Amino acid sequence: MVLYTSPFPNSFLSVLHSFSWGLIFPCYWLADRLVASFVPTTYEKRQRADDPCYFHALCIIITTPIYLALLVASLPFALIGFLLWSPLQSARRPYIYSRLEDKNHANGATLLTEWKAAGNGKSFCFGSANVCLLPDSLARFNNVFNTQARAKEIGRRIRNGASRPQIKIYIDSPTNTSISAASFSSLVSPQGGDNSNRTVNAGIKRTTSMEYKGDNSGSNNSEDIREDKGGPGEPNEGEENTCIVRINGEDNGHMSDTETDTINGQAHASGPAEPSLEGDSEISKTPNHKQKEGDSGSLDSYSASRESLVKVRVGDGTVDQSTVNNKLLYKASIMKKTSVRKKKHTDETFDHEISAFFPANLDFLCLQEVFDKRAAEKLKEQLHHYFEYIVYDVGVYSCHGCCSFKFVNSGLLFASRYPVMDAAYHCYPNGRGTDSLASKGALFLKVQVGSTPQDQRIVGYISCTHLQAIAGDTTVRCEQLDMLQDWLSEFRKSTSSSSTANPEELVAFDVICGDLNFDNCSSEDKLEQQHSLFTHYKDPCRIGPGEDKPWAIGTLLDPEGLYDDEVCTPDNLQKVLESEEGRKGYLVYPTSKNHSASQKGRKASLKGNGRRIDYMLYTEEGLYLEWKVEVEEFSFITQLAGLTDHLPVAMRLMVSTGEDDP
């Protein structure tokens, strides 16, 4: 299957489309600004609280006639442009595939080595988020604004979180699983000598969030520093950029105050923090410009100033100090509240957490509601610092391909560190109400993640979708889930080049990500909860229809509270969501006749932990029979606090191959 790298089959149509859109854009922009001036966000209201009450009204009175006059003047040009633009959509391709040609541009990403299916297996990390990148006037109805600046900031945060070093804590003592928060206020950077190789006691393996400091020096910091393989706790094949901390059982899993002071002193001796060199004046218009240095996820924090990456494996041996940047500072941020970081439910087979960062070494990213085309370009530019392959501008426009007129695309965007082999898009034909104005649908992708010594390709399937959003449209969503399964089955058949007798490809995973717009606890969503999709695909957060696992939380935030000081930074939002009372105050809960619609400050006992409408599903059906797929960890992520009204989710899958090659 040919991947489309441009929206039109030839340059003439592309130029004609650009010309027609150039005629439409002034009218579109003026209408957007006019509506936006009448829909203030809570953040803007607070900013204007000290202004005289007549000041904003005076601004509206002055600017509205100007916008209206310019809008009327631009209408004839917009009409001509529309008459050219609409017929062109019949020749438009359903997506644009972007591959980063200049590898030096991706200075925050780790170069991948091809997986040969040797060893015990390999893990793959998937992320999904609804980022609400609508035209600014429409985004304000969700209490977010400045779409262009948010797109750039969202891209920066995602790539900064994904490209940070990964810490794994191994516990050698099976009887002691305690980790002292006081003993791990920071981890020394590799130049810390013997103390940098200190190990700690705990009985589980954890992937922790951390802050780090880099000098933005580009590709000079991309040199790999590797330890000799072997010994207990060795990372699986393909795990890049991993920092391993082992606890050997001595001192009952704690470090003495003297040892802690030594480590902290060495960490701080590495030099003062330097501000990010990537600051952009446009970002100061977003609410998060008030974040202070050190806030997780902000551009002024250690975690966001990371532009290039030094990969360090800290084991039982020593690290070559001459090759390590002396400005790299590691800091374990999750030790502030270890009770949430550990597996609280001992019967769970995988780790789960509320994290202030996107997972390190994120392999695949599925985004929804990237509707604005200019914002999509800005987001793509930022994501290309980490992801080499991106599929964006997915969907159809005008009357082409679907039953009703489509003003915007599907809003889907896919980013990958692995090459995309095939892609297909289908539009849901049964959208209703305002959802029918967007070409919501499903994007199906086939990626190559490695090859066997026998030259068999190792592939994976990923589906990204966004279902009908209007409450009460249960039947519509069920029909869309039916179509999703049928389309996915057709896509797998049409792109498979294997047979049972002569397998040319080995399927490692099949994952579905997206905003399904129903939760597993609301009584109104019973039909969706019992859909056959959940008999073929597993939801790591779900026990059964109508019941989530105790640690699962909602992913839909209360828009009215997005800019409260308690939740406006990733760290603050993480702390709030770790408590039941905090979740009741800032998450949207399933609708109930016994409670008012307002979520803020509610103390009543509610079913579940909020509306979880963002899903990550995986299946064991249709995969290579000799391999086993299981969830390694699941995360709810707060790194986009203040930028969207959804919580991103992430899932790490382990593909176990056994000790022998297939």
Image: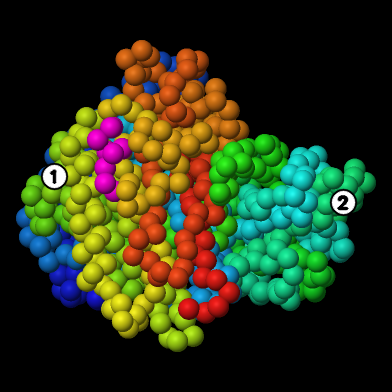
Pick whichever, 442 or 505, lies toward us: 505
Residue named by callout 2: 250
- Segment colored magenta: 525-533
Q: Is residue 47 visible?
A: no
| Magenta stretch: dominant secondary structure | helix
Q: Is residue 231 visible?
A: yes
> Dot 1, crowdedness within 10 Å: few (<14), some or many (≥20)?
some
**Rendered image: mark on residue 430:** 1
Direction from residue 273 to residue 651 in the image, left or right: left
- The way the protein has been coloured in the rendering is rainbow
Place of residue 659 in the rendered image (x, y in percent of width and height, measured from the top left): 58, 74
Place of residue 501 in the rendered image (x, y in percent of width and height, measured from the top left): 31, 81
Q: Residue at x 20, y 49 (%)?
A: 482
User: Splitting the image into 4 quarters, where does residue 36 fall?
Assistant: top left
Quarter of the image with the N terminus is bottom left
The secondary structure type at the circle numbered 1 is loop
